[in-house]
Amino acid sequence: MIRTQPHAGGWLEVVCGPMFCGKSEELIRRLRRAEIAGQRALIVKPLIDDRYDVGHVVSHAGTKMRAVTAQSSNEVRRLAQGYDAVGIDEVQFFDAGIVDAVDALVAGGARVIAAGLAQDFRGLPFGAMPTLLCVAEFVDKLEAVCHRCGGPATMTQRLVDGQPAPFAGETIQVGALDSYEARCRSCFQPGEDALGAAVASAHGRRA
């Protein structure tokens, strides 16, 4: 796809999709190209994401690039000041202020690339992602391979002992293959508590 980038000023690119679709790998690819072009590039990741390496963004495939960690959106804004290209990995884990932080970086002339999960394990919009998707100049929604049927996966299934996790659980739970699978819509399974609520609602309507 050929894109016409703005002639002046900054802009926002969002790369989203389920787990295992290559978001971090795409983020790294874009930032490395920025470095090759002679731009000052930086990747910021949330401190909570310590699955592979605290000092790097690491894709599930093993590709990695040095990164700095931040605990808040204000810290992201401070760390990224002065860079030409800024990558934010797992952006859904940051607080709601990340939208304003990104807007400030873009207004300052930076190219910002935000990568993250569009939906949580319940299939609901995740954190600030809906707003970032709306205000971005460019959006890429990637697909993974469904762990069940091999089809195109757009959702993330959280597992507990191999079974769908209850929807009442915490929204943020960092993990990988041991606790998550990519699923297509047909293979995605709601947790037992969600099924129970749906059945109770159906009974209520019939009553």
Image (cartoon, grey):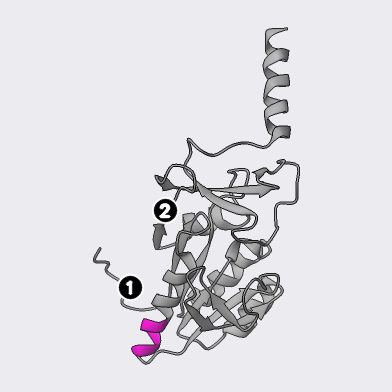
Identify the residue at horizontal 35%, vertical 79% (top origin). 8
Question: Is label 2 in a helix, a strand or a loop?
Answer: loop
Q: How far from the left and from the top, in percent, is residue 141? A: 42, 55
**Numbered label attached to residue 143:** 2
Q: Residues within 10 Å of mark 1 (few under 14, many from 20)?
A: few
Q: How far from the left and from the top, in percent, is residue 132? A: 52, 59
Identify the residue at horizontal 45%, vertical 64% (top origin). 22
Q: Residue furthest top?
A: 207
Is 182 placed above or below 76 here?
Answer: above
Q: CA distance from mark 2 to mark 1?
A: 27 Å
Q: Which residues are magenta?
A: 32-36
Residue 111 relative to residue 36: left or right: right
Q: Where, by quadrant of the figure, is residue 166 drawn?
A: top right
Residue 3 relative to residue 100: left or right: left
Identify which amino acid the numbered label 2 is placed on.
Answer: Glu
Q: Are marks 2 and 1 in contact (CB under 8 Å)?
A: no
Identify the residue at horizontal 68%, vertical 63% (top origin). 95
Is 38 placed above or below 49 here?
Answer: below
- Nearer the observer, 149 or 16: 149
- Nearer the observer, 25 or 149: 149
* Among numbered discs 2 and 1, the one appearing first in the sequence: 1
Residue 167 relative to residue 38: left or right: right
| Secondary structure, magenta segment, majority class | helix
Identify which amino acid the numbered label 1 is placed on.
Answer: Pro
Q: How far from the left and from the top, in percent, is residue 172? A: 70, 57
Based on the picture, tell me whether residue 33 belongs to the magenta stretch: yes
- Nearer the observer, 9 or 86: 86
Q: Where, by quadrant of the figure, is residue 174 drawn?
A: bottom right
Based on the picture, tell me whether residue 147 belongs to the magenta stretch: no
**Numbered label attached to residue 6:** 1
Identify the residue at horizontal 72%, vertical 27% (top origin). 197
